[in-house]
Amino acid sequence: MFPDKFVNRIRLQEYIDAENLLKSLEEPSPVSIRINPVKWNREPLDAKPVPWCSSGFYLNHRPGYTFDPLFHAGCFYPQEASGMFIEQVFRQIAGSPEQCRVLDLCGAPGGKSTHLSSLIGSDSLLVTNEVIKSRAFVLAENIVKWGITNTIVTQNDPHDFSELTDFFDIILVDAPCSGEGMFRDGVAVNEWSVANTHHCAERQKRILSDIWPALKKNGILIYSTCTFNPGENEQNIKWILTGHLAESVEINTSDFKGIVNIDFEGIKGYGFYPDRTKGEGFFISVLKKTGSADKVLPRIQKKRWMEPNKPDLKIVNEWTRFKADTIIKKGDQIISFPGFKDDCYLLHQHLKIIYSGTRIGSVKRNGFVPDHEMALSDGIIKDAFPLVDLDYHKAICYLRRENFSFDGIPSGWFIAAYSGINLGFCNNIGKRINNYYPVDWRIRKHPDENTGGDLIGWK
């Protein structure tokens, strides 16, 4: 049962067929995933493509992810299909930029961020942010597994970005909302109230105001929610236009059946309603900033501890394809920071960065120790380390951070892989093999406790 006040509102709401929408919200949610083209070039069996996403697929059943090594290796990401429309927005407004700075302000758990990292190119910079600490670390984990090395992860309040005036070319605000588009989930229904829709709308305005100075002149703001509520959607976009120099940007949806073009006092928005499109409820709108900020970027303060030495750069060249001018050093860690060095200095001044880029390794007394982040990244040189392809059972042992052994494993550092895809590092020290899979990421369940679905089959 849906709240009476919600039902009464949508029955009077423009663009909505209330009875068909309510009926669709009682049906099971579609299952969809997005493939990581950098790591995996196969398609799932018996799947249908998501029309607006080149790497998205609808599955005909809900698979198990916990015990799927390919999921942990970053070959695919389970993502709701409507949200994948960000690809069409990005391609139509940005094309194929050689370099750009992008912010995903509300990035956790990582669906849109991993998608954006695939879209913007290796020479661009994606800052993906989450204000809640626990969710920020989940976001960082998913970014590392995805392995495209153009992303950093921050844990900041939106207001913290206001000092970065005219910095970002594109900002995505996938705003916290009342969640009406997720009403197939009983939790979302139980949390809904009229008071909460008003609270969400006010919070969204605060977020938009805080982030606006960080957008460049002629930059693009992409705003999205998973609600049907006009007060959180098109009315908030109208509010931004009323108080700021900006214009609404139209997106061509003619190739995609079922997407509803919303026109509200000149505001262009796009509604995904589960009775018309295959996915959850979703709203998206795009603005172009036509004015610039009154303030200028603060002075960059360079830090000496960020400069690598010659031995550091030598190991970087032996292990990776990263350019020397992307390398920074934090303590004993060697890191490749995406974007420009000045970006690195500036962002470290103003933001709490919990993932600074790809950690290549650490400098220890007996030499360099390679890092798990490098093993999963697209920056690693393929033959830099021996690769040992594990069968399914041993791959699960590795992901549970258990010890395993078999004949023929080379001595020293090697990469454990599954189906040719890197899972992470091990070190064969002779008497035993040390498993370097991150402790916090290990599969805690025993395989006998697996109650999930079958693994995805692949063509």
Image (spheres, helix red, strand yellow):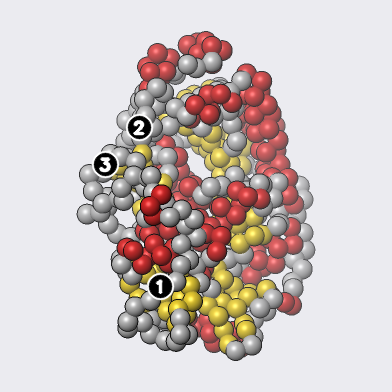
Q: Which mark is residue 278?
A: 2
Q: Is residue 307 visible?
A: yes
Q: Is residue 133 left or right of residue 67?
A: right
Residue 190 spot, x, y in % from top left: 56, 24
Q: Which residue is mark 1?
A: 404
Residue drawn at point x = 49 percent, y = 47 percent: 112
Residue 279 spot, x, y in % from top left: 39, 33
Q: Which residue is mark 3?
A: 48
Q: At label 2, which amino acid type do we have?
A: Lys
Q: Is residue 74 visible?
A: no
Q: Residues within 10 Å of mark 1 (few under 14, many from 20)?
A: few
Instruction: Work out whether residue 428 or residue 229 is closer to the camera in this orientation and state it.
Output: 428
Tag 2 secondary structure: loop
Residue drawn at point x = 53 percent, y = 65 percent: 438
Q: Choose mark 2 or mark 1, whichever is in front.
A: 1
Residue 259 spot, x, y in % from top left: 39, 29
Tag 3 secondary structure: strand
